Amino acid sequence: DDEGEFAWVRISDVTAAGMYLENTEQQLSGLGSSLSVKMQPGSLFLSIAGSVGKPCIAKIKCCIHDGFVYFPRWKGDPRCLYYIFASGEPYKGLGKMGTQLNLNTDTVGGINIGLPASREQTAIADFLDRETGRIDTLVAKKRRLIALLGEKRTALISRTVTRGLPADAASEFGIEPHTRFKDSGIEWLGEVPEGWEVKPVKRAAKVGNGSTPTRDNPLYWEDGNFPWLNSSVVNQEEVTQADQFVTPVALAECHLPRVLPPAVLVGITGQGKTRGLATTLLIESTINQHIAYLKPDEKLLIVGYLRRVFDMAYLILRNESDGGGSTKGAITCELIKSISLPLPSVKEQTAIAAYLDRETAKIDQLVTKVEAAIACLQEYRTALITAAVTGKIDVREEVA
């Protein structure tokens, strides 16, 4: 049936899809689809732009553009052809799947593949559907575990920086546990211990950001030796090194602060997870305009505690910076300065920071182990597909 709307396939749709394309973000009218290449359910096509080399089987009527190639003469099981390309074997000598491949219709048409008989194609596909499904289910469970560990980490930080140490930890650090609380007057903070103050960041820390010296001036970059950081560093737990450096001329002329460690850095732009993330700076450096630095008054506030408050404030910063106007999608230094801090004594801040460093490290180690297990499962999945489509696993018993 060629009448009615067809889904319009973009590279992003295939990138987000698994084996099957079940929906797209855009539709074509009957007129639009009449001017495009139509795919019926069960058709396989291959990306040659963006996620280069990624195969996909249509489960819906759809239209593709010249960023894809398809196989109009293919009469076998499309699942088997999918697995052949998903294995990466056809690309050997051409590069790796992703952006390294340079594919076009002629290149794909010239690829030689080992092709079993039709019944064995189905047997291979059935075997791989079953076995990769088991692996994918296990991977999904492990990813859910990572999400739960992340929620546990966030809850631990939030509870501790607003309520103080749990009784056993307070005793360990020589701190009296809190039994009486007061309303902080700040909705997202809720109640805090009676003896704590609540102050805006600007009354306890200096806040600023930096810039990016023009790349056209070699005096700013050539033979530079002073660390310059961009917003990618906030994805790290701690910043201990830099991969870009500016010159003394750039420091003097380009609104570049010299930030002494320790300090807190916060990502202030971007639509991804970077905006609002905090990290601890442990080297003297300068920063670009997409990061803010916070340097606390050590008589009132320590860096380790401040960092954990901003770990807690992540969602608040993102929500506040999602407002309208020219600052949409950006956190300003003024917003950071206005964030309210629950302030225990410096002694208690030190204890809280030490406790959270220790406990979050335990959670992070668990996450690392689970991520390593996922990586091993994904490697095994790829190896299994390769072995099946190259005949190294005998699946003929699958044939009825």
Image: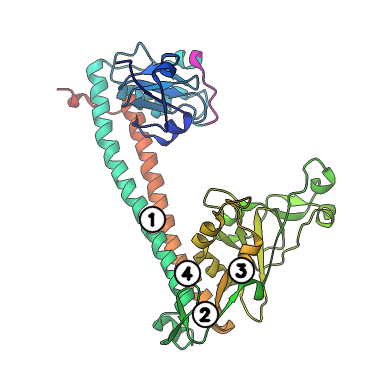
Q: Label 3: few (<14), some or many (≥20) within 10 Å?
A: few
User: Which residue is more in the foreground, 148 or 341?
Assistant: 341
- Regarding mark 4 in the picture, which secondary structure is present there? loop
Q: CA distance from mark 4 to mark 1?
A: 22 Å
Q: Name the spot of residue 331 as percent of width and height, x first.
A: 60, 57
Name the residue tied to disc 4. Answer: 188
Q: Residue at x 41, y 87 (%)?
A: 179
Q: Earlier in the sequence, mark 2 or mark 1?
A: 1
Q: What mark, if any, has residue 338 been given in the picture?
A: 3
Q: Name the spot of residue 247 as percent of width and height, x first.
A: 81, 52
Q: Residue at x 81, y 48 (%)?
A: 220
To which quarter of the image does residue 163 belong? Answer: bottom left
The type of residue carrying mark 3 is: Ser
Q: Earlier in the sequence, mark 3 or mark 2?
A: 3
Q: What mark, if any, has residue 351 been given in the picture?
A: 2
Q: CA distance from mark 3 to mark 2?
A: 25 Å
What's the magenta region? 99-106
Residue 104 within the magenta-colored segment of the rendering: yes
248 on left or right of 262: right
Q: Label 2: few (<14), some or many (≥20) within 10 Å?
A: many
Q: Earlier in the sequence, mark 4 or mark 1?
A: 1
Task: Give the foreground label among 1 and 3.
Answer: 3
User: Which residue is more in the foreground, 81 or 338?
Assistant: 338
Name the residue tied to disc 1. Answer: 147
Q: CA distance from mark 2 to mark 1?
A: 27 Å
User: Can you name the residue that lies furthest to the left here?
Assistant: 400
- Regarding mark 3 in the picture, which secondary structure is present there? helix
| The C terminus: image quadrant | top left
